[in-house]
Amino acid sequence: MSLTQELKARAEQSATKYPETTHAIMNNGIAILREEGLVKKALKTGDKIPEVTLPNAANKTISLQELLLENKVVLSFYRGGWCPYCNLELKALQQALPEFEKNGATLVAISPETPDNSLSTSEKNNLSFEVLSDTNNAIAKKFNLVFTLPKDLIEVYNGFGIDLNSSNGNTNQELPLSATYIIDKDGTILYDFIKEDYKERADPEEILKFLKNK
C-alpha cells in the first residue's frame, strides 16, 4: 500500500471515530490556513533555502549545507511524533530511504519537537535518517511554513492528550505546515509539496520518480 493510500485509510477511520463537532473544528483549522494563503507564501521550487543548522535527536548539530556538499537533500517538515499522519509518513520515508540514497539524495526530517521528543519519535519508528529539532520553529518560519493553532483546535488537541507545550518546549502553540522539498546541492529547491491539509503528504513513490528523472 502506498503512503497516499495509507493516509486516506487513516483519514476514513478517523472520520468514524470522532464526533462531527470535532471534525468541524479540525476542518475549520484547515480552511483558515487556506484563507490566509500560507502555502502561497512558503518557499517553493526555484527558491534558495536559508542556512539550516539544527540539533539532531542525539543533540548533535547538523548542517544541511554540509550535507548538500555530498548529495541532494529530501527535506520533510512534520508536525511531531504525536501526529499519526506524520508517523505514517516517517515510516514510508524510512522504507524508501535506500532508493533515495541510491539516487543521490540524503533524507532529513525537521519538526518543532525538542531533541528528547525527536529521539522518542525516531526510536518509535526505527528511523535511520537525521531527525532535527527546530526550536520555536525558527527554520520553518524562514520557509514561511508556520501558523498558530486556533483556540478551539488547541482544546481538541488537549482532549486527544496532545500537549504541544511539552512536545515543543514552549507555549507558542505553533506548528509548521507539512511540507516536503527536494533541494539541489547549490541550495536551490527543485521540488516542493506543501498542503494546508495535514492529511496530505508527498508520496515517496513520487519523490523517487522525481529523483530518477533528475
Image (tube, rainbow, N blue to C red):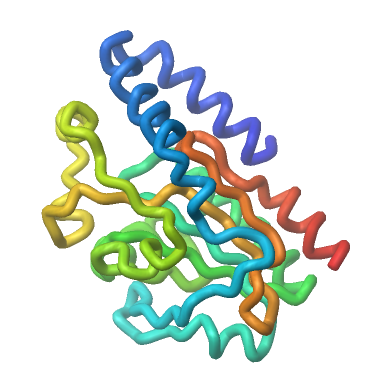
Q: Is 131 or 22 nearer to us in this picture?
A: 22
Taking 167 as reference, is 24 above or below it? above
Q: Quadrant of the N terminus?
A: top right
Residue 113 in picture, x, y percent from top left: 28, 60
**Rendering quarter of residue 107:** bottom right
Q: Measuring 36% from the left and 53% from the top, which residue is drawn there? A: 146
Q: Is 22 or 117 nearer to us in this picture?
A: 22
Taking 34 as reference, is 132 above or below it? below
Please indicate whether residue 143 sits to the left or right of residue 133 in the image: right
Residue 36 in picture, x, y percent from top left: 40, 38
The total of numbered circles placed on residues is 0
Q: Measuring 51% from the left and 18% from the top, which residue is drawn there? A: 12
**Rendering quarter of residue 189:** bottom right
Q: Quadrant of the C terminus?
A: bottom right
Please indicate whether residue 161 sits to the left or right of residue 137 in the image: left
Taking 129 as reference, is 166 above or below it? above
Residue 102 in picture, x, y percent from top left: 77, 73
Residue 169 in picture, x, y percent from top left: 16, 61
Q: Measuring 35% from the left and 15% from the top, which residue is drawn there? A: 17
Q: Is 135 or 1 nearer to us in this picture?
A: 135
**Rendering quarter of residue 142:** bottom left
Q: Measuring 44% from the left and 45% from the top, which residue is drawn there? A: 38
Please indicate whether residue 1 sits to the left or right of residue 148 in the image: right
